[in-house]
Image (spheres, rainbow, N blue to C red):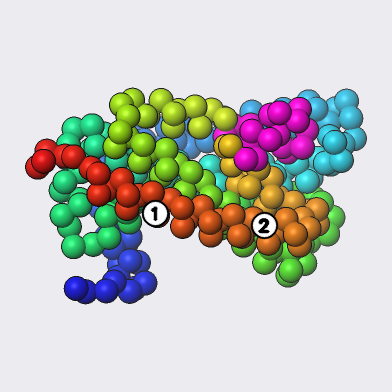
Amino acid sequence: MKRNTMRDYLRLLGTFFRVSLLGELAYRANFWLQAIESLIELGTALALVSVVFTYTQSLNGWHASELLILIGTYFLIGGAINMIITPGMSRLIEQVRLGTLDYLLTKPEEAQLLVSIQRLDLWKLLDLLFGLALLVAAASWHGSWPSPLQILAFALTLLAGAIIVYSFVLFLATLSFWYVRVENILVIFESMYEAGRWPVDIYPGWLRATLTFIVPVAFAVTVPAEALTARLTWLALLGTLALAALALLVTRLFWRFAVRHYSGASS
């Protein structure tokens, strides 16, 4: 049996990217609609920050420039979620319900990879660009650029946060092998992710625990922002990386278990 290499996976991702791009270019008006939507969302977030800091100098220790760094991180992770993770998982739930997942499971490529990248919403790249631009602007306003170690910690925690969110959403989507209407859970997750616009430590204890240990918003947004604002401890960094590795392993095992018990159209 052929063993896929990283080059094979990147080539496969590139193929899906080109196919998605061709599909999106057929409806170019969607680009402008997405641009308007992203600008409105960004403008709303900035307006709320402006209102809050009209009445205070800091929000539980977070200054305005640091909060903008967090919002930039929110847009980066949110862009990745809405561009890759959510479209693929929504399609997976639909395929399980219709019994058409068989077509992917019989492909020679890794099934988990195929379901993860089978649908890309490329215009969500705008959220990534807006988030990156806001990060640069906020870091400049902050008065001191992050050190190389801070940037490295940010990159590692950002990747770890994306892995944790991916694992969490894939776990939820895989429940569709046994339960109907799982997509409602994804909608709830997307709603709770909006809480990531603010640091999780400003919320009441019960909600902070929920956004940390049940819905991993804290690891996706707050922890990377803490890395850029010199708030992140080495213990929190190592814990985040360890959790990402554990989440990926558990989700991988759960996916393989679910596939073995899948009953599709060919059953």
- The amino acid at mark 2 is Gly
Residue position marked by numbered label 2 in the rendering: 239
Q: Is residue 41 above or below residue 167?
A: above
Residue nearest the observer in this picture, 238 or 49: 238
User: Where residue 164 appears, x then y in whole percent?
Assistant: 53, 50
**Which quarter of the image is occupied by the C terminus?**
top left
Residue 238 picture quarter: bottom right
Q: Secondary structure at mark 2?
A: helix
Residue 16 picture quarter: bottom left
Q: State yes or no: residue 12 in magenta.
A: no
Q: State yes or no: residue 196 in magenta.
A: yes
Residue position marked by numbered label 1 in the rendering: 253
User: Where residue 250 appears, x then y in whole percent?
Assistant: 46, 52
Q: Residue at x 83, y 31 (%)?
A: 53
Q: Is residue 225 above or below residue 55?
A: below
Q: Residues within 10 Å of mark 2 (few under 14, many from 20)?
A: few
Residue 123 in view in this figure: no
